[in-house]
């Protein structure tokens, strides 16, 4: 039945029920608690009490289940981020994200889309707060650097997206493509992701998954130099392949612009030391990228 | 008559001709391929297989990387499980402490590192 054909009373009931479901759980006591006083008054009037439960308490069951289900979905989709932040703090950001972006489809697996970007925005001013006194419930995430949490969220999301990407045939350019390749834009396969980390997050993620638990994990020391990886999938298996900094830069440039523009940018921004080896490295890196199935196609209509 | 590659290198782009030529050679896989779909025995190529496997005891990632570097290979990390080797080489499984040589893609063992060696 389409929304337009619904009776008005049913539309109103559904709208107020949806509003009740999305009512944030109260965090002030250190326990997530439903607060029926925030529910729409009309809905409270329509709901009936049963046994020992008031109308508000009955509705609160649905309210809690909505949030607990979605918290669990996000915790599973972002296991490293959740363990680094601590579940209490992670749930706070998850709730804020879900209030701003409530699920609108049937697929729970899509709930986390946009979460890293949301965290990036939310945590951009976090460093000041980071140094303030936190509540006892936030102590577990006290030491996690917001930048590391954002990086962790991107890595978690990359694992999620790469694992769930549809099967894609790798693109292997033919000699007939050669004349058009300089002006073509290569399409990054959805079954790969380019990752960079400034903390040993990929290893920490593996460790966190191997030792599930409620305790927050402590962020390890920042790396002296960023590390870069290609996360790739073959069948149902994932692998992290180390990338050289120049290789990571080239693949990133190629995923955003034409081959010619990417090469020009690479050549323009490399150091004098790198320039001499750039052609031989570029050949090696691109042959490897084709072999690993980094590309799913090329857009020649530039 | 110029080849498609030569014509492409002559195309007006803002990087050096040398770099563009190298990039196109790479994209067109003018480097030696490692394991391709031609691994089908019916096509006359070698069947992917583990050719030797030896228990070598505990090995650190640094030890493995040194061995891989000595053979000009590329270390691949297996965060979930093996079976992802992108080329022939050798792998170390830290659950069995076995070091195995394999001939082609997909033949490495689980849990550890693979060293992909491109001829």
Image (cartoon, helix red, strand yellow):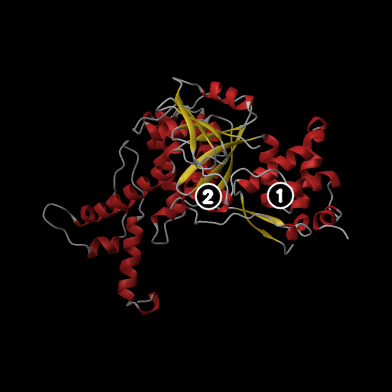
Quadrant of the rendered image containing residue A229: top right
Picture layout, residue A139 above or below residue A254: above
Secondary element at tag 2: helix
Picture layout, residue B22 above or below residue A41: above
Dot 1 alpha-carbon crowd within 10 angstroms: few under 14, some 14 to 19, many 20 or more: many
The percent coordinates of residue A121 (x first, y second) are: 55, 44
Question: As rendered, which of A210 and A128 lies closer to the eye?
Answer: A210
The percent coordinates of residue A107 (x first, y second) are: 40, 58
Tag 2 near tag 1, CB within 8 Å: no
Mark 2 sits on what residue? B41
Q: Is residue B112 left or right of residue A49?
A: right
Picture layout, residue A180 above or below residue B81: below
Residue at (23%, 55%) from the top-left corner? A56
Q: Residue furthest bottom?
A: A5
Whether residue A129 is visible, yes or no, is: no
Q: Residue furthest right?
A: B1
Question: As rendered, which of A106 and A289 lies closer to the eye?
Answer: A289
Question: As rendered, which of A22 and A42 lies closer to the eye?
Answer: A22
Secondary element at tag 1: helix
- Is there one chain holding both mark 2 and mark 1? yes
Chain letter of mark 2 equals B
Dot 2 alpha-carbon crowd within 10 angstroms: few under 14, some 14 to 19, many 20 or more: few
Mark 1 sits on what residue? B27
Residue at (34%, 61%) from the top-left corner? A18
Whether residue B23 is visible, yes or no, is: yes
Residue at (31%, 42%) from the top-left corner? A32
Distance, label 2 to label 1, CA atoms, is 27 Å
The percent coordinates of residue B44 (x first, y second) are: 57, 50
């Amino acid at each position: 039945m389409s929304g337009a054909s619904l009776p008005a009373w049913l539309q109103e009931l559904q709208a107020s029920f949806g509003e009740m479901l999305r009512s944030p759980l109260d965090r002030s006591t250190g326990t997530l608690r439903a607060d029926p006083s925030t529910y729409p008054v009309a809905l409270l009037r329509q709901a009936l009490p049963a046994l020992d439960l008031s109308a508000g308490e009955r509705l609160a069951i649905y309210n809690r289940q909505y949030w607990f289900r979605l918290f669990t979905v996000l915790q599973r989709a972002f296991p490293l981020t959740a363990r680094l932040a601590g579940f209490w703090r992670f749930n706070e950001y998850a709730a804020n994200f879900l209030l701003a972006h409530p699920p609108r489809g049937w697929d729970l697996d899509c709930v986390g889309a946009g979460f890293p970007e949301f965290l990036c925005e939310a945590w951009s001013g976090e460093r000041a707060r980071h140094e303030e006194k936190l509540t006892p419930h936030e102590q577990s995430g006290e030491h996690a650097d917001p930048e590391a949490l954002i990086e962790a969220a991107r890595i978690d999301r990359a694992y999620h997206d790469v694992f769930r990407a549809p099967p894609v045939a790798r693109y292997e350019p033919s000699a007939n493509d050669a004349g058009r390749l300089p002006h073509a834009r290569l399409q990054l396969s959805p079954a790969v992701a380019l990752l960079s980390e400034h903390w040993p997050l990929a290893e920490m993620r593996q460790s966190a998954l191997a030792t599930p638990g409620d305790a927050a994990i402590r962020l390890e020391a920042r790396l002296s130099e960023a590390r870069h990886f290609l996360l790739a999938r073959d069948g149902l298996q994932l692998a992290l392949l180390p990338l050289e900094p120049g290789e990571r830069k080239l693949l990133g440039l190629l995923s955003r612009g034409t081959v010619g523009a990417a090469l020009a940018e690479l050549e323009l921004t490399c150091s004098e030391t790198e320039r001499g080896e750039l052609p031989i490295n570029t050949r090696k890196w691109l042959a490897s990228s084709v072999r690993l199935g980094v590309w799913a196609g090329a857009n020649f209509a530039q | 008559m110029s080849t498609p590659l030569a014509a492409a290198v002559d195309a007006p782009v803002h990087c050096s001709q040398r770099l563009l030529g190298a990039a196109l050679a790479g994209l067109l896989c003018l480097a030696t391929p490692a394991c391709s779909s031609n691994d089908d025995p019916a096509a006359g190529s070698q069947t992917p297989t583990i050719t030797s496997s030896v228990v070598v005891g505990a090995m650190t990632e640094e030890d493995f990387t040194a061995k891989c570097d000595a053979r000009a290979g590329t270390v691949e990390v297996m965060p979930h499980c093996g079976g992802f080797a992108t080329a022939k080489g050798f792998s170390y499984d830290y659950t069995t402490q076995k070091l195995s040589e394999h001939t082609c893609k997909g033949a490495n063992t689980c849990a550890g590192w693979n060293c992909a060696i491109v001829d």
